[in-house]
Amino acid sequence: MCGVTGCFLSEGGNAAYYNYVMLHANQHRGQESAGICVYDGLRLVGKKGMGLVTEVFSREDLDELTGPVGIGHVRYSTTGASELVNAQPFKVGYAKGELAIAHNGDIVNSEVLRRELEASGHAFVSDTDSEVIARLLAVELTETDDVFEAFERVMDVLIGSYCLTVLTSSGDLIAVRDPWGFRPLWIGWDDRGYFVSSESVGLDVVGVGGNRREIKRGEVVWIREGEMESKTLRRERKAVCMFEFVYFARPDSVIEGRCVYGCRKRMGYRLAEESPVDCDVVVPIPDSGRTAALGYAERLGVPMEEGLIKNRYVGRTFIMPEQQERVESIRVKLNPIRDVVEGNSVVVVDDSIVRGNTSRQIVEMLRSAGASEIHFRVASPPIISPCYYGIDMATYEELIAHEHDSDVEAIRKDIGADSLWYLSLDGLVKAIGMKKSELCIGCLTDRYPTPRPEDFEGSSEVEPIEQ
Amino acid sequence: MCGVTGCFLSEGGNAAYYNYVMLHANQHRGQESAGICVYDGLRLVGKKGMGLVTEVFSREDLDELTGPVGIGHVRYSTTGASELVNAQPFKVGYAKGELAIAHNGDIVNSEVLRRELEASGHAFVSDTDSEVIARLLAVELTETDDVFEAFERVMDVLIGSYCLTVLTSSGDLIAVRDPWGFRPLWIGWDDRGYFVSSESVGLDVVGVGGNRREIKRGEVVWIREGEMESKTLRRERKAVCMFEFVYFARPDSVIEGRCVYGCRKRMGYRLAEESPVDCDVVVPIPDSGRTAALGYAERLGVPMEEGLIKNRYVGRTFIMPEQQERVESIRVKLNPIRDVVEGNSVVVVDDSIVRGNTSRQIVEMLRSAGASEIHFRVASPPIISPCYYGIDMATYEELIAHEHDSDVEAIRKDIGADSLWYLSLDGLVKAIGMKKSELCIGCLTDRYPTPRPEDFEGSSEVEPIEQ
Amino acid sequence: MCGVTGCFLSEGGNAAYYNYVMLHANQHRGQESAGICVYDGLRLVGKKGMGLVTEVFSREDLDELTGPVGIGHVRYSTTGASELVNAQPFKVGYAKGELAIAHNGDIVNSEVLRRELEASGHAFVSDTDSEVIARLLAVELTETDDVFEAFERVMDVLIGSYCLTVLTSSGDLIAVRDPWGFRPLWIGWDDRGYFVSSESVGLDVVGVGGNRREIKRGEVVWIREGEMESKTLRRERKAVCMFEFVYFARPDSVIEGRCVYGCRKRMGYRLAEESPVDCDVVVPIPDSGRTAALGYAERLGVPMEEGLIKNRYVGRTFIMPEQQERVESIRVKLNPIRDVVEGNSVVVVDDSIVRGNTSRQIVEMLRSAGASEIHFRVASPPIISPCYYGIDMATYEELIAHEHDSDVEAIRKDIGADSLWYLSLDGLVKAIGMKKSELCIGCLTDRYPTPRPEDFEGSSEVEPIEQ
Amino acid sequence: MCGVTGCFLSEGGNAAYYNYVMLHANQHRGQESAGICVYDGLRLVGKKGMGLVTEVFSREDLDELTGPVGIGHVRYSTTGASELVNAQPFKVGYAKGELAIAHNGDIVNSEVLRRELEASGHAFVSDTDSEVIARLLAVELTETDDVFEAFERVMDVLIGSYCLTVLTSSGDLIAVRDPWGFRPLWIGWDDRGYFVSSESVGLDVVGVGGNRREIKRGEVVWIREGEMESKTLRRERKAVCMFEFVYFARPDSVIEGRCVYGCRKRMGYRLAEESPVDCDVVVPIPDSGRTAALGYAERLGVPMEEGLIKNRYVGRTFIMPEQQERVESIRVKLNPIRDVVEGNSVVVVDDSIVRGNTSRQIVEMLRSAGASEIHFRVASPPIISPCYYGIDMATYEELIAHEHDSDVEAIRKDIGADSLWYLSLDGLVKAIGMKKSELCIGCLTDRYPTPRPEDFEGSSEVEPIEQ
């Protein structure tokens, strides 16, 4: 996953600062690298680095990135290794000047497109989809000055998820959402100018008030000389990622008009209705299971208690030394409160189960803290297939639901709970409040809105792209 | 505030790793600097640095700090500037070898003691109380080999709060809690050896089971050659810091036999009983107000909702640029969910109010998110005086309750809420479940269990310490 | 200027280490950035960074760059800003795999070539000539698998100086010297494999004995599967840079069969013959003027004295604060010995004068140290024009000889010496011992062996490169 | 070895900058750590770090160290491990305020003094002699405000070499040279204020003109409120380190009125007279043997040639990987010029031989470069004993002259030269031009001007220092 931002200040100012603040609000979408690129009136200048936004940028860095238009990116790698060369925004010089691109998503046919470009003699410096998009765009913009025309051709060939912010050395800001609408992308405006952010919380934090909307699927927004123009260039069937609602997005974000917090609360209600338990206490897995747990407890009329405490300082850098007896990695992150669980029948609520290791450790930990019964409730259906659109869900083999062939009883035994219930697909869809046909639920059904990457393998005839 | 740890591995092993893990569990007690010092069989070797435990120590660092006995420290400065020279453990060489000391607390008469040592020709390299203690201890240990005898004399002169872990170049580990018992200090043991940690969560994370207890006030625990010996050397009236229960300690910690989470929940109950509101929703200030809010909502039978979302990545390093219009520092940390508050009468629950700035901003933010009424409930009484025992509560002038002379109505107006209620002192004491006379409530009453630092000023006759 | 290296270990081993050692021997050719790229048996992996070879690479870095074939680069920027993105080796993925390139030199028509590639839709990530070469090469290697055929086409269009080492993901090492032979490039071999280095000192330091030779101008050396094949693809008139002999190369290097030290000594002899002075002492400007000064003094029979002492620790990072009175930047680098110069008629010998500022300061400094007469002797002719082939000689305007229109008397007055003599062009050529027509002396005569960059400006018709 | 500096600006200004520049000029005296401490009008503030002066201090650092009085230090460790805690200036707070101390030298009886202080209850944070001096000084200054009186008592007990600069929180600058005068220390003054530097080159670089002199042995210079006062408090027999002249000091420095360059040149003359060779060429070991080689060659009338070229970029950080065949560490530093040595009878001149390893490798290298004969000439007598006064000459066991019991023929065989000659002690003394009785030649004769450290061992009665 990744987050993208953009900012066009009509009256001048420092776009880097606003991007910094918006990236920080989207930080949960990617902690591996961060970058900002601005138009300084003449050229594109940028900085990117490994780590959090606050680690990559010092005050001096932000002061040096002067310019009224800019884009930003936070990255969690799904394609491309964890190296600085793969960090974004990705900047290139081409026939008409420079362009920089920030991308959230995964292109399903990127290997094909890359091979086609290579067959024409193009060479790549990174492993990323973003470079594929940037090179395709440079090819098209070399042919035409019309951004819409160029994107029409680029969107003709791109299959997969892509929310983009693009910056040109003419000082234009472009925002694009793919024709399926997999991932969120917002735009807001006021007297200061235009602001683009993956999630609506980015607009909240820079104080953009009522003038805001989601960029539509297939829409290209082109802001130049302070004027915004927009065209919807291509539409496929709507396929909004259900996992944004379940886990990925911040609860205070709005996606497709729905408050994510509310959706999660309703998942908790549904879960209680589908699978009530005569229990003493409901305990969330912090922080991801908390909202659904609130809903579950409220609907059942049972108290919710914070029976598992999360260490706020757990991060990428904790060193788990092997030599230490009896120090378990789960304990470093989560610690149970004996007073809450001892002698009690406990319902544990989490948003989802991917690999299952953590769930198993939590059950064990609660058991040893004295819980008499442990009922595991999951606010989404079993994940049985990988995500091809930007969420790192591992391969088939690693998915616990795939491993047990969706046999819930087998999974229950594996994690050691006294009972286990996954929210039904129907319940999930109702909680979100969109039509099932408008959601991407590929990872739950193995049926995807686009061909899968492997569907392009062996496509024998690689033709050079027409130029 | 600070956190201290210690570890004595009877069968050998790497004490640095265990200290690292325990410090990480105590990280909330201090994020400014971290340090570990171990006895390598010959000498004391250590590393300390500015930042979080995970930032200061790499795997290589931990591998190099080999030795079966060691102590650790995390620091949030109350005395001494934020410089590496003030980081701990503080190590010195003296007549009998070396000793290192880690200290949590504040010595009320440290200036007097320092001047006395200086009058005898002693010179100091840092500004810390810890160096004062270390030099006093070195003086006494030069005279006697009996650790109890040495501490008896040191504890005779030290006034204030001090939980100490001490390491000597004989490979001894010593743990000390002051005669008032202001701050927590735990010891646990099993077949691996002895483990000391400010909070009980440190013992949880290294897997120490049932063999554990709080070190008593005035107690010195001396572990040498694998044997633990203990003496209670001095007792003053019990004065456990109420703020550990209210805010400072982790909810999963146990202090004086009481689960902190339970105390906070009961503060919520009491608050509901003292000041119920006919409201639509109860919203906690995350994360500190959540447990009390749960109690408040449960007692009133009103739903608690997470109406304020905290950005998990806020930390020391966020840069708040001045040039940005409409970007407020509060928004970077907290964002309201409009769906939860709009049109509703909202009760906001926080653990305490110190300066009041954040409270004011939160009220404004909720108001602009559409709350019809905002009732502020605080799970502790007004703070009217500074803390002299290690909590950074600012000077009198900065305390909002002091500024308004404890006039709750004036404070309410200042922060802009529709109503405001502080938990009564009686309610707080009952929620904690200890006798009022056993708690330090100096910051609530301006009556302290020891003389204050200013009481020592002008003490004209400075006599050299006898040697 | 830059330095390039390459290494192919027939029996396996760590090519990164050998490149590291050879780069260190070529460090004087570029101190801005350093990089190494190796073939790890599957892919190309590398590291590059700003600073000296010893600053960029740690032992861990070298251990991680495992692979038997690799190339290296040290850079002093002439094109492209001082940024990491411009550091080399430059690596790309293309239709047939990956290739990495290290380049010493300057391409005169790189702007034209870049515009042609861009017109075909290519996009660039850096400002460097090296990326132009890499993209041209990728285009050609996409068409053919024959390295010689590909380079034939690339060399058809490249005008300027280029010594290249190239690494492919087939594990081939390629070394190329341009058809004019501007800059040196050596290859050596023994039972360990093949070693390529800009200067012969690189081969000395890895212990390559007698089996070595200079790569010929226009020659491409292709090493694959342990076999070396070579073809001379294109020849222009020989144009070896005279400044390599005068200043740039290490004195212990051999260029075109000539020991650089010997050439410099002979420049001193010639200088003495052309312009003897009845003086007390000959003083070199350390370290660049020392060899010529030895020759000058020996021929005149006057003692040479080290009357100016250089601070060995002067480097990129010295901060020259403005606020300090009477601290001169020249004094930080050079300090005169009063005993050597006081009351004496002094001949000062330097290798060349570019901007003249340093010369002026040295004359002043010696004057104030008591020299009775100061005679400046320069071991090369006046530099009147820029270098277009890789040496950073500034623009016309900055050259002192250009400023004074080659009027030696005017220059003498400007630097304040009692007399000034530049070695004649004829003397220089004789000292080097090559034909005048085989040397590039463009900066001395304003007549260059190729068109200049400005000769390509306004070339209106930019045609896409055929593909 | 170390270097110390100090600066008192009468009219205000930034003393840190001047110390920075002077430390840079003394950088050859210590490359391990660097530090500056200034009086900011109220307190002493400083920075120190591992590495070169230019690595430790950024422009921001220097800007932050504002204050008109300051001291500086560069360190090459002789006592104390290579750790930041041992870096200087060493700063302490004591009864009257603060003091910081920078020390060049070695205290012979520091262990005794330390034990005495410890017996009185003092505790130490470092391993350095400097802390011993600082604590002794703090003890005495606690008793008296008269700096001379305090130093009189301190100098009564200190045995060994010490050049000190001291800074107090009254803004006083104090400079002290030990009663033997082992190491150099200069003071200069002009309208800007006072400048102190280990070597005279420090004064050159800040532009101090004629008003300068060496601080006398046993002298204390006290500068306060812009006035300088001086007293000579104690005198022992003069014992100036001969190795400063031979190797350690910069050639452009003046010590005891003698230009170091001239002394070295005369060592070369003497060497030629004592041991002339009928040779083709004289080759110096760069850079240390160059001046003596010039003298040797001049006196013999044989040309000196730079037949060994030193890589200017060799430093602390070069990684010598073990896996590499045929890469010798000597080659990384020095490379012979075949044209200069092939077929020739070569005289190699170095300043001294300590361990002999380098000499052996050089002889081998010249032999393999074709030298027909190799005659080694050393510009100082054999080193047979350690230095106790600050020069890191290793233990007895490591000294090649000690190993071979001063048998020159045995040493010759060991290093493989055709002949070997060491300058006689008489020749050395005459070249320096001081009386033999005024030089410290302990490392040449095993007879030292003070007791040795081992002479204090077993001194049974350790009495507390009187206070």
Image (cartoon, coloured by chain):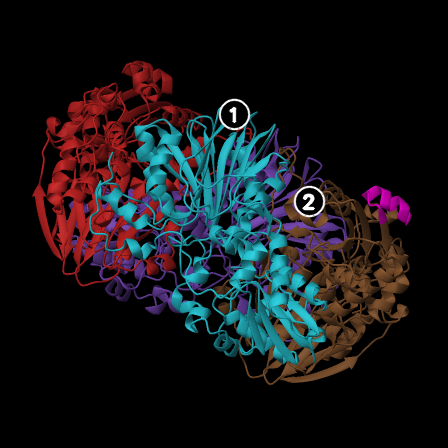
Chain colours: A cyan, B brown, C red, D purple
| B236 or A124, nearer to the observer | A124
Which residue does the numbered mark 2 point to in the structure image? B330
Circle 2/circle 1 CB separation < 8 Å: no
| Number of residues whose C-alpha sits closer than 10 Å to that of mark 2, classed few (under 14), some (14–19) or many (20 or more) | some
| Number of residues whose C-alpha sits closer than 10 Å to that of mark 1, classed few (under 14), some (14–19) or many (20 or more) | some
| Quadrant of the frame with the N terminus of chain C | top left
Which residue does the numbered mark 1 point to in the structure image? A226
Secondary structure, mark 2, is: helix
Q: Is residue B228 above or below residue A169?
A: below
Residue B417 in magenta?
yes
Coordinates of residue D116 in the picture (x, y in percent): 67, 68
| Left or right, D385 with reference to B397 | left
Mark 1: amino acid: Gly
Q: Give, as a single range, the part of the protein colored magenta.
A: B403-419
Can residue A214 be seen in the rendering of this structure? yes
Coordinates of residue A317 in the picture (x, y in percent): 52, 60
| Left or right, C331 with reference to C67 | right
The quarter holding residue B78 reads bottom right
Q: Chain of mark 2?
A: B
